[in-house]
Image (cartoon, rainbow, N blue to C red):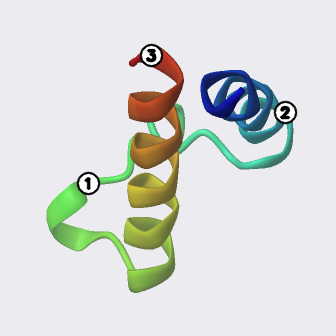
Amino acid sequence: MKKQLFKILAKVNKVILPSLSKQQVDLAKATKLQMALIGWRWYVTKNALD
């Protein structure tokens, strides 16, 4: 059940949230909001794959 929820969240993230890699955001120069988005997407992806 939990894994299924994270898979749905991952699909929603892909559609709604901006792709920071396509924008070539440098992690050293990323703003706090961009770092929060990166962290959120990492958390959801990690849990969707487990």
Is 35 positioned to the left or the right of 40 in the image? left
Residue for point 80% across, 28% down: 8
Residue 35 placement (x, y as % from top left): 37, 68
* Amino acid found under the numbered disc labelled 2: Val
Quick one: SS at disc 1?
loop
Location of residue 26 with respect to 44 vertically, above or below? below
Is 7 positioned to the left or the right of 42 in the image? right
- Camera-side residue: 25 or 37? 37
Residue for point 32% across, 70% down: 30
Quick one: SS at disc 2?
helix
Q: Are marks 2 and 1 in contact (CB under 8 Å)?
A: no
Q: Which residue is mark 1?
A: 26
Location of residue 36 with respect to 47 vertically, above or below? below
Quick one: SS at disc 3?
helix
Location of residue 36 with respect to 26 vertically, above or below? below
* Amino acid found under the numbered disc labelled 3: Leu
